[in-house]
Image (tube, rainbow, N blue to C red):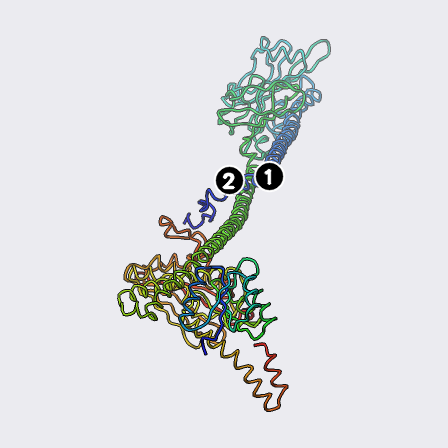
């Protein structure tokens, strides 16, 4: 099942993101990379990932903007911020915009993978819960769960 | 003693000489203020005093002259009256008595007796005929038949009708004078009545006259021979006076003459129709005594005034210049603080920049090394080489450590802008002490952090707290010897205050320096690069946070700095 988790890594440091991608793959997760904001948005449009790992500071469209747009278009995508120079203010803003978690570089690979798994779990739980409520006839609650922006 | 009186600015050396141009030279400022004020205040005072001095002196001298002059003219009238009285008495006798009556010795003796009783002062009487021969004589000497025809006085009495002689000793060896009047008889004949006047009466008359200022009245003739004894000049009658004979004047005149080092005020008047000059001699010094008294008062008052004015002027100047000095110190201090915080800010920015730049390659190293480790972990062909695994592990640990440092630097730099936010004191202290971990290890300094659990997060300025704690830590580290210890303790004092203490095992601070450690530019490490600003800036930062800082110390044991911070910054103590 894990192999099905599609992770998109976005970071302008190519070497970093490539290596991280490789390491994630070694842990049986599917991963793709993007080196800047525009590219990330394009990749998301082509193939919607389950989880996104997003750097905050990037040339062009920065992480915050990417987060905003992705969450708007695909609210079900779980976004994990991974940044080297974010402040608490940035963290607050990112969480408000719907980021699942906020990690500081350097982050331990196990922590990253764990967070990805948790995020994925959350993503797939939502429709299941909604389906359960829908089966029970509580459509409003099911709709609420789907619309909930957490 | 003098050092205590010395104002603070006196030995001022600008600690920042070279950096900040000196606005004031306090010492010359002080001198200028004192000199100018003294000049402006004392000049009129001295001027007025000199004027007053001159005026009162002039008045005193005028008064003396006036008094002397009045005295002399009064006395002249008395003396002239005395002589005239006797002359008129003789005139009366010659007119009242016929020649044969006055030439009768018995009758003449009666007349002399009457004169002595009635007027006094007469000692003998003689009648001299036109040929100059004394016809009749009554008195203590036998002068009958004496021929006066060749003598000057006889000639004078023939010409003028009367004669008053100088004082002379005569036969009786007592000073006396002679008064003679001529009486014309029918047919160009005449005779002269001559009387000796005893000088005792004369002397008594003069001494009866009151003379102020210990002066004396004397009579001299036109040659300057004393006719009466002079107590003032210590000479008896018929001696020469010690001063020159004043020139003739029809009225009373007063002049000053200095005799044997003393200034004498001499008032004199020529007695008309006599050879006499009435002279009043007064010692000017004695007369000026009342004025000298006034002068002493004036000078005393001036001296006192000058003293008080100088005291006030010096006091005011010192006070004002000291205030300017204090203000200037504060200005320089503020400049330093600005410079210091600017420096801190730019160091912070630079550190943040460096940390950012380093962070990215660090991430790469980290991930690459992680990947290598992954290979060893997951790929069977690389597995089971514990040595390589260990190497990679070591790389990862190092990178993690670097990462921790850059994170810390970034978190410091991020809190440069001041803002109140909830802070956890334990975390800030941990961050700060983390900076000195390595130094502490190298120098075998034991750093202990002890934070009470019941300290809640509270609103404060994280950046300022970091700076305060870092300053105190650095300060402690600069004094702790190898093998010493720094104990940092945070405890909740009560509901409203939390106390953070930094106790070191340094040499301690002498009591006399203890109250000065927070003063700007106070340093005992000036030769070792201390600016004397660290603790003073810390002090200001603590104040800005509404807290308090104090230092305690025991020589040889160490010092403790205690920062007390309010848990609620809004409730500052009144």
Q: What is the residue that sits farthest to the right in this orientation? A: B186
Image spot of residue A72 (x, y percent): 61, 71
Numbered disc 1: secondary structure: helix
Which percent across, then down, holds residue B40? 60, 39
The residue tagged 1 is B40
Is label 1 or label 2 in front? 2
Q: Residues within 10 Å of mark 1 (few under 14, many from 20)?
A: few
Image-based side of B327 in relation to A144, left or right: left
How many angstroms separate mark 1 from mark 2 (CA)?
18 Å
Q: B573 or B21, which lies in front?
A: B21
Q: Is residue B158 visible?
A: yes
Q: Is residue B422 above or below residue A138?
A: above
In the picture, the quarter occupied by the C terminus of chain B is: bottom right
Q: Position of residue B148 (x, y in %)?
A: 58, 11
| Chain label for disc 1 | B
Decide: marks 1, 2 in contact (CB < 8 A)?
no
In the image, residue B534 sits, relative to residue B258, either above or below, namely below
Same chain assignment for discs 1 and 2: yes
Image vertical order of residue B115 relative to residue B43, above or below = above
User: Does residue B296 appear in this view?
Assistant: no
Q: Chain of mark 2?
A: B
Q: Which label was assigned to residue B145?
A: none
Instruction: Give SS at disc 2.
Output: helix
Mark 2 highlights which residue?
B28
Closer to us: B574 or B483: B483
Please tell me in which quadrant of the rendered image residue B117 appears: top right
């Amino acid at each position: 099942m894990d192999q099905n988790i599609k992770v998109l890594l976005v970071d302008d440091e190519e070497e970093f993101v490539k290596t991280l991608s490789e390491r994630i793959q070694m842990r049986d997760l599917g991963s793709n990379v993007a080196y800047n904001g525009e590219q990330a948005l394009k990749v998301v449009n082509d193939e919607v990932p389950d989880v996104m790992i997003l750097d905050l500071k990037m040339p062009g469209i920065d992480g915050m903007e990417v987060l905003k747009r992705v969450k708007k278009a695909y609210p079900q995508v779980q976004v994990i911020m991974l940044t080297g120079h974010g402040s608490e203010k940035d963290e607050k803003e990112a969480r408000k915009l719907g980021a699942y978690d906020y990690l500081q570089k350097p982050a331990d690979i196990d922590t990253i993978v764990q967070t990805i798994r948790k995020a994925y779990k959350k993503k797939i739980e939502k429709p299941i819960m909604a389906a359960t409520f829908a089966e029970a006839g509580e459509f409003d609650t099911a709709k609420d769960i789907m619309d909930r922006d957490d | 003693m003098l050092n205590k009186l010395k104002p603070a600015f006196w030995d001022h050396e600008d600690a920042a000489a070279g950096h900040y141009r000196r606005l004031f030279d306090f010492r010359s400022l002080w001198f200028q203020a004192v000199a100018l004020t003294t000049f402006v205040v004392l000049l009129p005072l001295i001027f007025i005093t000199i004027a007053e001095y001159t005026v009162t002196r002039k008045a005193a001298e005028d008064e003396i002259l006036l008094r002397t002059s009045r005295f002399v003219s009064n006395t002249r009238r008395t003396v002239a009256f005395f002589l005239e009285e006797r002359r008129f008495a003789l005139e009366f006798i010659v007119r009242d008595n016929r020649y044969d009556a006055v030439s009768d010795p018995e009758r003449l003796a009666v007349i002399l007796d009457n004169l002595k009783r009635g007027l006094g002062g007469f000692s003998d009487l003689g009648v001299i005929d036109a040929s100059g021969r004394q016809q009749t004589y009554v008195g203590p000497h036998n002068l009958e038949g004496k021929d006066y025809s060749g003598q000057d006085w006889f000639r004078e009495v023939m010409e003028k009708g009367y004669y008053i002689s100088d004082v002379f000793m005569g036969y009786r060896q007592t000073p006396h004078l002679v008064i003679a009047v001529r009486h014309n008889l029918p047919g160009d004949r005449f005779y002269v009545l001559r009387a000796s006047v005893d000088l005792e009466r004369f002397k008594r008359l003069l001494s009866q006259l009151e003379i102020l200022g210990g002066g004396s009245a004397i009579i001299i003739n036109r040659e300057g021979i004393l006719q009466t004894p002079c107590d003032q000049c210590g000479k008896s009658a018929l001696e020469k006076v010690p001063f020159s004979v004043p020139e003739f004047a029809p009225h009373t005149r007063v002049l000053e003459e200095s005799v044997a080092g003393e200034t004498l005020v001499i008032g004199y008047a020529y007695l008309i129709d006599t050879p006499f000059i009435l002279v009043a001699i007064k010692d000017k010094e004695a007369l000026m005594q009342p004025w000298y008294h006034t002068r002493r008062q004036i000078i005393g008052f001036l001296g006192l005034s000058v003293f008080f004015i100088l005291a006030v002027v010096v006091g005011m100047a010192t006070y004002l210049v000291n205030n300017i000095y204090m203000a200037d110190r504060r200005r320089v201090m503020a400049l330093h603080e600005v410079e210091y915080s600017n420096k801190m800010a730019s160091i912070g920015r630079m550190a943040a920049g460096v940390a950012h730049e380093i962070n990215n390659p660090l991430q790469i190293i980290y991930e690459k090394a992680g990947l290598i480790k992954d290979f060893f972990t997951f790929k069977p062909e690389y597995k089971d080489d514990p040595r390589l695994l260990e190497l990679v592990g070591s790389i990862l640990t190092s990178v993690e450590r670097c990462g921790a440092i850059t994170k810390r630097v970034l978190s410091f730099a991020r809190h440069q802008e001041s803002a109140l936010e909830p802070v956890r004191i334990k975390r800030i202290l941990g961050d700060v002490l983390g900076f000195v971990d390595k130094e502490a290890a190298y120098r075998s300094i034991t750093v202990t952090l002890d934070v009470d659990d019941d300290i809640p997060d509270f609103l404060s300025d994280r950046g300022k707290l970091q700076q305060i704690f870092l300053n105190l830590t650095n300060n402690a580290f600069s004094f702790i010897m190898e093998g010493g210890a720094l104990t940092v303790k945070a405890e909740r004092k009560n509901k409203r205050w939390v106390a953070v203490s930094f106790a070191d095992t340094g040499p301690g601070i002498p009591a006399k320096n203890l109250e000065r450690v927070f003063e700007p530019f106070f340093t005992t490490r000036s030769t070792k690069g201390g600016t004397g600003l660290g603790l003073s800036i810390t002090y200001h930062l603590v104040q800005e946070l509404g807290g308090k800082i104090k230092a305690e110390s025991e020589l040889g044991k160490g010092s403790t700095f205690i920062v007390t911070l309010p848990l609620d910054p809004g409730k500052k103590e009144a």
